[in-house]
Image (cartoon, grey):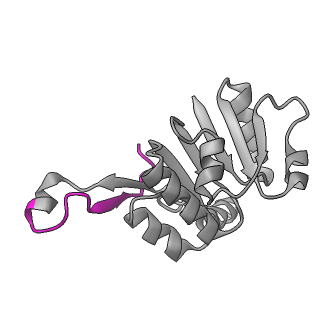
Amino acid sequence: MRTIIVGCGRVGAGLATQLADDGHEVVILDQSNEAFRRLSPSFPGQALRGDGTDESVLRRAGAEGADWFLALTNGDNRNILAAQLAAKTFSIPHVVCKINDPVRAQAYATLGVNTVDRTMMMIDSIGRFMGRPAMPGATNVTRAVPRPASVADAGHMPNDLAVDRTGGR
């Protein structure tokens, strides 16, 4: 599988290495050459310097025909823009966007982008460590799923979306 990762921070670099070790064809993008130092010295994938919100950079990274696209920078706006470009322009079937703001994460999921809400994951993890019950959906990707066809019959557009907080289970 071909996977493109935007953002070579700790999460992006770690995931890129794991996926490449599992046999994925991985391309990781970052605007800073320094960021690529986080990659394992034996990283077999491709590291490209560039802006993941730039269509020509994504084309050069092989976005056409990619199976997965992960927007993992520290910027919510940059991540959502890159994720939308991957989904809409390149029709990448599996797109995940890291978001720090829980309100934005929910809104973007409603708009059709799978999101990982880092803030709620941290709140859930610390709470569970302290003995609280797990928060529903806090440790999963919030998946955007199409609403049933009956919604379209009620006067809504057929591509209206609902949010699946179960993580696809």
Residue 27, above or below 70: above
Q: Is residue 109 visible?
A: yes
Q: Position of residue 8 (x, y in %)?
A: 77, 51
Q: Is residue 139 visible?
A: no
Identified at 66% across, 29% down, the residue is 25
Q: Position of residue 21 (x, y in %)?
A: 74, 26
Figure label count: 0
Main secondary structure type of the part rendered in magenta: loop
Left or right relative to 25: residue 65: left
Q: Is residue 48 magenta?
A: no
Image quadrant containing the N terminus: top right
Question: Looking at this view, is 12 or 59 the one in front?
Answer: 59
The image quadrant of residue 44 is top right
Image quadrant containing the C terminus: top left
Q: Residue furthest left?
A: 153
Q: Position of residue 118 (x, y in %)?
A: 64, 63
Residue 154, above or below 97: below
The image quadrant of residue 133 is bottom right
Residue 128, above or below 42: below
Q: Residue furthest front?
A: 56
Identified at 70% across, 58% down, the residue is 51
Q: Position of residue 85 (x, y in %)?
A: 51, 57
Identified at 76% across, 36% down, the residue is 46
Question: Looking at this view, is 52 or 69 the one in front?
Answer: 52
Q: Residue furthest top?
A: 23
The magenta-colored residue range is 153-169
Identified at 45% across, 58% down, the residue is 113
Q: Is residue 155 magenta?
A: yes
Left or right relative to 31: residue 161: left
